[in-house]
């Protein structure tokens, strides 16, 4: 029971870290460009498909991973320059509609190229097997590696935003985009870079998660909606909020699904305990979100409502 | 002059909706009648959304929740009636029903209560937060429907015989179409009266300038909440009809994709225009039918078209034809 508990905790951590890779791009794009991008989940899907296709073609998961980053960044940059750029000065309704249209295009396009059947990504040879953690807890090595990789990327992102010249420009863009344009920063290029960066993070998350699940059209949307919940909880535009929100959502969702049926089983018969427990668990993160919003309408780290 | 042009277009839309199924009846093409019924139902769902989206400026991305609640009201009540199982036996006995009128009343009450709860939380926020949170609440209900096994869970629920309406054979396609068209007409007439009333003016005022509205002594929150509830009720009624059209209800009626589609009907036709949802739903169904017949991946050109409408034709179909922008 103890090892199962720790395993679920780690699963929660893994889903939280992957959510952060999605949510950070979403929140950056919103913070800097003021754009709500529904097609972010499509970039996640693009990353997963690129990884699966290249890994199957070359036989190397690592080349697949590189491909996922490049394909998603490229798709992101292209979409930004062709379409998204025209939406910055539009209202949110136009942004929602245009990016919804992009989802249709991406999903149907992918279905056209790859077909409707899911693809499978296999774990690289030396990451198969399990790792023994303190307390005799066995955990799949690949999932453990994903957690580490996710944290490394997250740390890299914080360094990029906090310490580099690009990061300073991104933060300045969030604060006052007119001013940094006046100071001679090429604002169009900055926007393209931010969008491509967010896309690359989403694509990477897609490749990682695609390895533990299956790669299929429509895989991006459930994650996108979770990422929305995350940035609403964390406060839109805040990277720190995205991190806290991701971990909170990851843990709440995983532990809720694990613990609630057990909790109900203490006073209900097993079948109805499973039914009520799992139904309630599927709603749990939204209840948490409603609670956070009730107390702080602009999220934990949000600045404006 | 331009107003007259919009009125002319509206009349053409209304006449087309009624004429097409009648011609189809003469040519013995029941499938066309079913398509027209679908247009009427989707248009009605759009009329509901248009109230908050077009006139209230509130971008609700979760109206599938209400569409699905209406659908499940029909599915659940009918399944209890057909299985002779009471919905509850304590504290009082409550039976299922196959009468549409009772189903509609239940759908209206259930959607109003849930919209009141969702609206009370979501309307505290605005802008992007509102979009995301309405979406998230709809997803919550969607996942609940999937994981709750009593009413079919992921597989959905079949309605073996279409529910009844007094004095009407609802199984006859043209009769059911007539019923749906009349309901659409009532919803549009109600919506037209509502937006011209004091309440409707206050709702539009709150969209145009919230601060000024507050300054003249009208609380935008309450106006918006009432509009959100009414809008949800209209969409739920459309959902109940849709379940009866398909004789089937499943969680896909609650999915975010459905919310997006209802929004597309409104935008494609023209935001904040009375006949916009009808034009949009009609165009959508025609495209689905034509493109879907030619190419399996018809949503790809649909996406491109939608993108073009958003980027270049901002008044939607009615807006382009009437040659006039509704609001800046």
Image (cartoon, coloured by chain):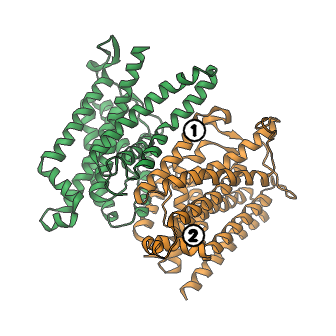
Chain colours: A green, B orange
* Chain letter of disc 2 in the image: B
Q: Mark 1 points at which residue?
A: B144
Image x and y of residue A203, in percent? 31, 41
Q: Say what secondary structure mark 1 lies in.
A: helix
* Chain letter of disc 1 in the image: B
Quick one: quadrant of the C terminus of chain B? Answer: bottom left
Query: Furthest-top residue in view?
Result: A136
Q: Mark 2 points at which residue?
A: B276
Image x and y of residue A253, in percent? 44, 33
Residue at 72% x, 60% y: name it. Answer: B33
Which mark is on residue A232? Answer: none
In front: mark 2 or mark 1?
Answer: 1
Number of residues whose C-alpha sits closer than 10 Å to that of mark 2, classed few (under 14), some (14–19) or many (20 or more): many
* Cα–Cα span, label 2 and label 1: 32 Å
Residue at 20% x, 42% y: name it. Answer: A158
Quick one: quadrant of the N terminus of chain B? Answer: bottom right
User: Splitting the image into 4 quarters, where does residue A115 fall?
Assistant: top left
Asked if residue B130 lies left or right of residue A181, the reply is right
Q: In this view, does A5 lie above or below A38?
A: above
Q: Nearer the viewer, residue A69 or A94?
A: A94
Image x and y of residue A151, in percent? 25, 33
Q: Can residue A71 be seen in this view?
A: no
Asked if residue B79 lies left or right of residue B271, the reply is right
């Amino acid at each position: 029971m103890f090892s199962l508990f720790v395993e679920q905790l780690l699963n929660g951590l893994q889903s939280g870290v992957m959510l952060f890779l999605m949510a950070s791009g979403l929140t950056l794009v919103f913070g800097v460009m003021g754009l709500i991008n529904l097609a972010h989940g499509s970039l996640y899907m693009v990353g997963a498909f690129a990884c699966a296709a290249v890994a199957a073609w070359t036989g190397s998961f690592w080349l697949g991973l590189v491909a996922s980053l490049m394909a998603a960044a490229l798709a992101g940059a292209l979409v930004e320059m062709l379409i998204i750029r025209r939406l910055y000065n539009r209202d949110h309704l136009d942004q929602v509609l245009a990016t919804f249209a992009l989802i249709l295009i991406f999903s149907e396009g992918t279905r056209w190229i790859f077909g409707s059947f899911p693809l499978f990504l296999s774990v690289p040879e030396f990451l198969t097997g399990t790792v023994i953690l303190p307390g005799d807890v066995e955990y799949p090595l690949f999932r453990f590696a994903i957690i580490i990789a996710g944290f490394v990327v997250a740390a890299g992102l914080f360094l990029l935003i906090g310490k580099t010249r690009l990061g300073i420009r991104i933060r300045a863009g969030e604060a006052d985009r007119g001013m940094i344009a006046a100071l001679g920063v090429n604002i169009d290029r900055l926007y393209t870079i931010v969008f491509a960066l967010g896309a690359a993070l989403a694509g990477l998350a897609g490749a990682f998660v695609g390895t533990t699940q299956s790669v299929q059209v429509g895989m991006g949307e459930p994650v996108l909606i979770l990422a929305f919940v995350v940035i609403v909880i964390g406060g839109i535009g805040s990277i720190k909020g995205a991190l806290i929100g991701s971990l909170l959502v990851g843990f709440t969702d995983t532990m809720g699904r694990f613990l609630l049926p057990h909790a109900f089983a203490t006073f209900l018969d097993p079948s109805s305990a499973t039914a009520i427990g799992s139904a309630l668990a599927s709603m749990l993160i939204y209840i948490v979100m409603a609670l956070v919003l009730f107390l702080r309408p602009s999220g934990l780290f949000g600045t404006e409502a | 002059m331009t107003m007259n042009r919009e009125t002319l277009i509206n009349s053409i839309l209304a006449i087309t909706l009624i004429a097409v199924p009648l011609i189809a009846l003469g040519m013995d093409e029941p499938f066309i009648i079913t398509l027209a019924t679908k247009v009427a139902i989707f248009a009605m769902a759009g009329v509901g959304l248009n109230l908050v989206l077009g006139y209230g400026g509130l971008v609700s991305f979760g109206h599938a929740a209400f569409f699905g609640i209406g659908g499940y009201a029909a599915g659940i009540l009918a399944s209890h009636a057909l299985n002779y199982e009471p919905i509850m036996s304590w504290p009082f006995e409550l039976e299922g029903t196959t009468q549409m009128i009772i189903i509609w009343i239940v759908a209206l009450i259930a959607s109003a209560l849930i919209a009141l709860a969702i609206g009370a939380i979501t309307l505290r926020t605005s802008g992007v937060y509102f979009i995301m949170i309405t979406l998230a609440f709809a997803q919550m209900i969607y996942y609940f429907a999937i994981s709750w096994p009593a009413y079919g869970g992921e597989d959905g629920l079949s309605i073996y015989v279409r529910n009844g309406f007094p004095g009407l054979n609802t199984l006859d396609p043209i009769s059911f179409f007539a019923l749906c068209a009349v309901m659409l007409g009532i919803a549009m007439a109600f919506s037209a009266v509502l937006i011209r009333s004091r309440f409707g003016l206050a709702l539009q005022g709150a969209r145009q300038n919230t601060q000024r509205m507050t300054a003249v002594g009208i609380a935008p929150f309450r106006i918006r909440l009432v509009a959100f509830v009414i809008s949800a009720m209209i969409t739920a009624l459309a959902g109940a009809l849709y379940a009866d059209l398909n004789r089937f209800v499943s969680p896909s009626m609650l999915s975010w994709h459905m919310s997006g589609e209802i929004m597309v009907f409104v935008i494609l036709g023209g935001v904040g225009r009375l006949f916009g949802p009808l034009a949009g739903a009609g165009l959508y169904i025609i495209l689905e039918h034509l493109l879907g017949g030619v190419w399996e991946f018809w949503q790809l050109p649909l996406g491109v078209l939608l993108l073009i409408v958003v980027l270049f034709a901002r008044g939607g179909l009615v807006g382009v034809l009437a040659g006039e922008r509704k609001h800046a």
